[in-house]
Amino acid sequence: MKNTFKNIDEYILLFPEIEDKLKAIRKIIHAQDAGIEEYIGYQMPAFRYKSKPLVYFAGYKKHIGFYPGAAGIKKFEHEFTTRNYKFSKGAVQFPINEKLPEDLIREIVYFRMEEIKNKKS
């Protein structure tokens, strides 16, 4: 996808069929901490916490990609398998024809925040 957007609002408008789900993910992420910042990274909505990349998401034709990094995937691999979500080393796919796993998204974001807090830099 060519970068035809300047911010997350414009990105979400590119996906009218899943706009509500993308907005819900954004809201869940922001609800975790007032210090979470938005930006566009790798041509998708991205969020950082304490100046470190937190998570990304992206809209697709049949799923929403959620990118919590390798440790975020590894930690929740069993949950993804149980729910029959496709996943890879750094991403999980939430089917657009299913209810958004809001609790799982919260848990993943919280895990990533704790990971960032505890990382020695």
Image: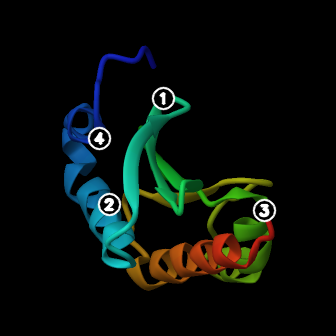
Which mark is nearer the camera, 4 or 3? Answer: 3
Q: Amino acid at mark 2?
A: Arg
Q: Which residue is mark 1?
A: 43
Q: The residue tagged with tag 4: helix, strand or loop?
A: helix
Q: Please report contact status of discs 4 and 1: CB closer than 8 Å, yes or no.
A: no
Q: Which residue is mark 3?
A: 121
* Residue 78 left/right relative to 24: right
Residue 49 appears anywhere in the view: yes
Which image quarter is the C terminus in?
Answer: bottom right
Identify the mark nearer the N-term, 4 or 3: 4
- Residue 33's place in the image compared with 51, above or below, is below
Which residue is painted at 73% across and 67% down in the image?
73
Q: The residue tagged with tag 1: helix, strand or loop?
A: loop
Q: Which residue is mark 4?
A: 8
Q: The residue tagged with tag 2: helix, strand or loop?
A: helix
- Residue 75's place in the image compared with 94, above or below, is below
The Cα atoms of the two marked residues, 4 and 3, are separated by 29 Å
The Cα atoms of the two marked residues, 4 and 1, are separated by 10 Å
Q: Which residue is mark 2?
A: 26
Q: Amino acid at mark 1?
A: Gln
The Cα atoms of the two marked residues, 2 and 1, are separated by 16 Å
